[in-house]
C-alpha cells in the first residue's frame, strides 16, 4: 500500500513513529512495542534511522520495518538519511527494502558527522528524485514549521520544500512543534508557495525537562509560555510533568484534527502508553 493513497481516501491519517534500538539487547523491548502498536491499527508507522545514516543504522531500520510489515501487518515508513552516504549505499538500502516488500520511504538529508564531508546527496531533493525514478516506491519528505535549524529564513526553507515536491515527494511529515498556530501559519505560506502535498503534523509529548531542552537545541523549536509554565509547575515532580506533557500533546492533536489537518504523526519515543493514549484520543 502506498501511503499517498491513504491521504487520498481519509482524513486525518493517524501515524506513529518508533526508533530501532541502539543495541541488540534492546530489540526484544522493541518487539513488545511493535506488538502493542499493531493492536492499535494506526494507518502507518514510521521507523527512524540514525542521522548519520551508516549501513548499520539503515540495517536496523530495515529489520524493524520488515518486522512491522511482515509479522504485524502494519504499513511501515522506512527512513533513509543520505548526506553521509554514497549512491552505492543508497542503492543497496533501497533494494533491500524492496526485497522485504517495503514500499514507503521517508527520504531525509540527515546530519553530517563532524569528521565527514557531504558525499553524493547534499540535500534530500536529489535522494527523492532518485528513489522515485527507480519505481515501486512512495516517497515522503520532512517539513519544518519553524524552518530548518540551518535555514536562513522560513521562506528559504519552503523553497527547498517545493524542490522536494517537484522531485517526486508524495506527502510530508512535519518536525515537532508546540504551538499549533505556528503550524497553521507555516501551512498557509507553503500553500501560497505552491506546495500542495498532504502534510501530517508531528507532535511530541513532553516527558521530561531534559528531553525538551535537548529537542530545542537539536531542532530549534520554540516554547510557548504555556509550556514554560508547565515545566516550572512540575519541576519537582517528573511523574506529574510526564502526565501533564502527554495531556497537552493529546489536546494539541485534537485541535489539529478539529482544524482540518491532513494527518497527525505522533512521536512515541518507543513508549507504548503514548501510542495507546494518542490513538484513543483520536478514535
Image: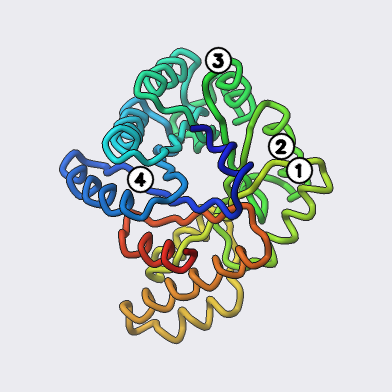
Within 10 Å of the Cα at label 2, are there few (<14), some (14-19), or many (20+) other Cα atoms?
A: some
State which mark lies toward you, 4 or 3. 3
If you read the primary sequence from the N terminus, does the residue marked by circle 4 or circle 1 appear first? 4
State which mark lies toward you, 4 or 2. 4
- The Cα atoms of the two marked residues, 4 and 3, are separated by 26 Å
- The Cα atoms of the two marked residues, 1 and 2, are separated by 7 Å
State which mark lies toward you, 3 or 2. 3
If you read the primary sequence from the N terminus, does the residue marked by circle 4 or circle 3 appear first? 4
Describe residue 12's horizontal placement relative to residue 112 as left or right: right
For label 4, the SS is loop
Q: Which residue is mark 1?
A: 156
**Residue at 46 percent of width and 23 percent of height:** 85
Q: Nearer the viewer, residue 277 or 54?
A: 277
Q: Are marks 4 and 3 in contact (CB under 8 Å)?
A: no
Q: Kindly indicate the quadrant of the structure image that contains residue 69.
A: top left
State which mark lies toward you, 3 or 1. 3
Q: Nearer the viewer, residue 2 or 134?
A: 2
Amino acid at each position: 500500500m502506498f501511503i499517498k493513497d491513504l491521504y487520498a481516501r481519509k482524513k486525518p491519517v493517524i501515524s506513529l513513529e518508533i526508533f530501532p534500538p541502539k543495541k541488540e539487547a534492546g530489540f526484544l523491548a522493541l518487539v513488545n512495542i511493535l506488538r502493542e502498536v499493531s493492536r492499535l491499527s494506526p494507518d502507518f508507522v514510521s521507523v527512524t534511522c540514525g542521522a548519520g545514516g551508516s549501513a548499520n543504522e539503515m540495517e536496523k531500520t530495515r529489520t524493524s520495518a520488515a518486522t512491522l510489515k511482515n509479522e504485524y501487518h502494519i504499513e511501515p515508513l522506512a527512513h533513509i538519511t543520505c548526506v553521509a552516504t554514497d549512491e552505492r549505499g543508497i542503492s543497496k538500502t533501497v533494494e533491500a527494502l524492496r526485497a522485504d516488500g517495503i514500499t514507503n520511504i521517508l527520504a531525509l538529508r540527515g546530519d553530517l558527522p563532524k569528521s565527514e564531508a557531504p558525499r553524493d546527496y547534499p540535500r534530500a531533493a536529489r535522494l527523492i528524485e532518485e528513489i522515485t525514478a527507480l519505481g515501486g516506491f512512495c516517497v515522503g519528505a520532512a517539513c519544518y514549521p519553524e524552518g530548518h535549524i540551518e535555514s536562513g529564513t522560513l521562506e528559504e526553507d519552503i523553497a527547498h520544500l517545493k524542490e522536494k515536491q517537484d522531485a517526486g515527494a508524495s506527502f510530508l511529515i512535519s518536525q515537532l512543534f508546540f504551538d499549533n498556530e505556528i503550524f497553521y501559519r507555516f501551512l498557509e505560506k507553503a500553500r501560497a508557495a505552491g506546495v500542495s502535498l498532504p502534510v501530517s503534523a508531528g507532535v511530541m509529548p513532553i516527558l521530561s525537562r531534559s528531553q525538551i531542552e535537548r529537542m530545542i537545541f537539536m531542532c530549534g523549536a520554540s516554547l510557548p509560555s504555556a509550556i514554560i509554565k508547565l515545566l516550572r509547575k512540575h519541576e519537582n515532580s517528573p511523574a506529574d510533568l510526564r502526565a501533564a506533557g502527554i495531556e497537552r500533546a493529546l489536546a494539541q492533536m485534537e485541535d489539529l484534527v478539529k482544524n482540518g489537518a491532513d494527518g497527525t504523526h505522533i512521536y512515541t519515543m518507543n513508549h507504548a502508553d503514548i501510542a495507546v493514549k494518542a490513538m484513543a484520543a483520536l478514535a
